[in-house]
Image: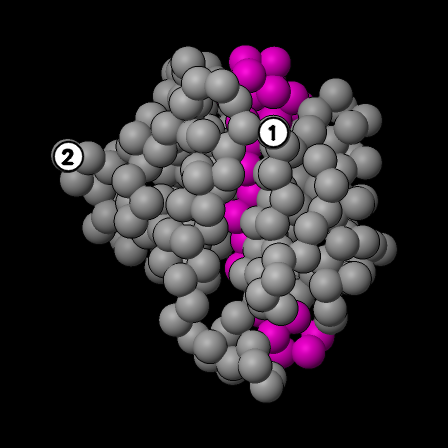
Amino acid sequence: MNDVMDRDIGLWSEFAPAGRTSRPALFLDRDGVIIADTGYVGRAEDVQMLEGVAAAIARCNALKIPVVVVTNQSGIARGRYDWDGFRNVQAVVAAHLAAAGAHLDAVLACAYHADGLGPLRIGDHPWRKPKPGMILAAADGMNLDLSRSWIVGDRAHDLAAGAAAGLCGGTLIPADEREPEAASALANSRFTVAIAASSAAAIAAVADRARCAT
């Protein structure tokens, strides 16, 4: 999988080859789910992998469940770091995952934000969560079955993007005490909401319960 900055200066996308048949996937936010959200993580030295996440992703890899990162990166829009910084962080994440026998099948990022600088000052870009654009783009590029796919995030807007994309459900690892109520409000007959204490537990549950099984 090669990194590719989209023709659009505010977007990033990289995909593994599409499968011949449509497959369900596991979508993950990055900061707060795979790595610690220490605030605008844009340097390799700031990466802190969350405990157990690499091993949990490796289990999904073994089950042939595509693992797709969809991440808002407002730090780029705000001028805190640039796409080179993002690339460097991703390289560290990939190395940590590889050490555990794990990998990501796709990474999509949106830098647009209402408080961004210059052309990145867009608050309602279709790729920026809670909008579903990154998920829909991954589905189109990888032949994914969204109706059987799941998302894990630390904010309600992560799950909102999943619900808007037509996923079957999502798991919240609460970033603060306000998030569970907002996430729970998204639950309905088509979208299941779960709460987990850790990212590793949330990702493992997807494998254990075969939520995204082929």
**Depth check: 100 or 69 in front?**
69
Q: Is 123 placed above or below 101 here?
A: below
User: Where in the figure is residue 60, as x and y percent of width and height?
Assistant: 56, 21
Snapshot quadrant of residue 171: top left
| Residue type (three-letter) at the residue carrying disc 2 | Ser
Whether residue 147 is visible, yes or no, is: yes
Q: Is residue 176 in view?
A: no
Q: Is residue 105 above or below residue 33?
A: above
Amino acid type of the residue tagged 1 in the rendering: Pro
Q: Which mark is residue 17?
A: 1
Magenta-tinted stretch? 55-80
What SS does tag 1 mark?
loop
Residue, x 73% and y 69% (percent of image)? 82
How far is mark 2 from mark 1, CA to CA?
32 Å
Find residue 158 and report its horizontal and vertical position in percent: 41, 51
Residue at 46%, 77% (x, y): give it.
122
Answer with left or right where residue 186 lies relative to residue 74. left
Q: Is residue 34 left or right of residue 24?
A: right
Q: Quadrant of residue 59?
A: top right
